Amino acid sequence: MNESFVLTEENGILTLTMGAEGNNLMTAAFLEGFENIMAEVEKRAAQGGLKGMIICGSGRHFSVGADVDALSDRSVKETYDDSTGILPEGHVKQKHAFTFLRSLPFPVVSAVTGFCIGSGSEIAVNSHYRIVEKTARVGQPESTFGILPALGGVARTIDICGMKTAYELVMTGELIAADRAYEIGWADIFAEKKQSAAEAVKLIEFIAENYSEFDGSQYKKYIAEYKRGLQ
């Protein structure tokens, strides 16, 4: 296993802890490691018996996003050829490692601390839920250097926040504070410092206790009922 990623299991809940260099700077090495660990998650999910999964950073930040130089280089190499209609194989594999999270048979919760931007934000929005600590800052700054989120971030942000808000977030590249993320629906739960992982466990346990089978298409219903119980 890549030492930048640690996958553990306790009481039926997987925890993926990301601990790559540079506060989870998404270099080519990070993305390769992420693809590999997601393949392990797929295998474990197929075995059944899991209540959910938490994704978090090992340090202060969830992820500071992509290495801009590496991302620009990859964008040039993976140009879409409209004469064939076939997307580059590397891009398809990489995107699957992000977007398949939505199809897992249990809730996936990103516990967001510090910066959660760019491709890091795409991990979070491809999760079913985002629990965001009050000191976090989130956003999709790709447009500020001439590209758009390409790992499911645009479609998922639209689904979560609505077209108008998603357009503003993606096209301005603005980084927003945690309270604003909660206000616009990007964050499902607003947590105190160092409490996001514990909150994630509570949410996963609630869903497991109240529903015999997790249906990803009903994710909004589950979180609404969980939050009603907190009031």
Image (cartoon, rainbow, N blue to C red):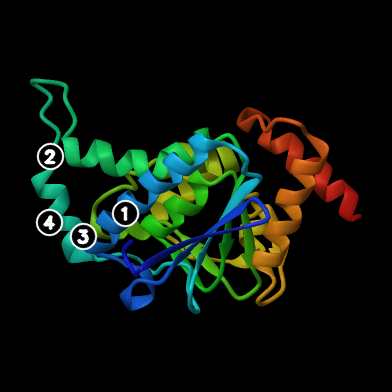
Q: Which residue is mark 1?
A: 143
Q: Quadrant of residue 161?
A: top right
- Residue type at mark 3: give it: Ala
Residue 195 in the image: above or below residue 49: below
Element under disc 3: helix
Q: Which residue is mark 2?
A: 79
Residue 19 in the image: above or below residue 100: below
Element under disc 4: helix
Q: CA distance from mark 4 to mark 1?
A: 16 Å
Q: Give the label, 1 or 2, closer to the camera.
A: 2
Chain-order first, disc 4 or disc 1: 4
Q: Which residue is mark 3?
A: 28
Q: Which residue is mark 4?
A: 73
Q: Quadrant of residue 90?
A: top left
- Residue type at mark 2: give it: Thr
Q: Give the label, 2 or 3, closer to the camera.
A: 3
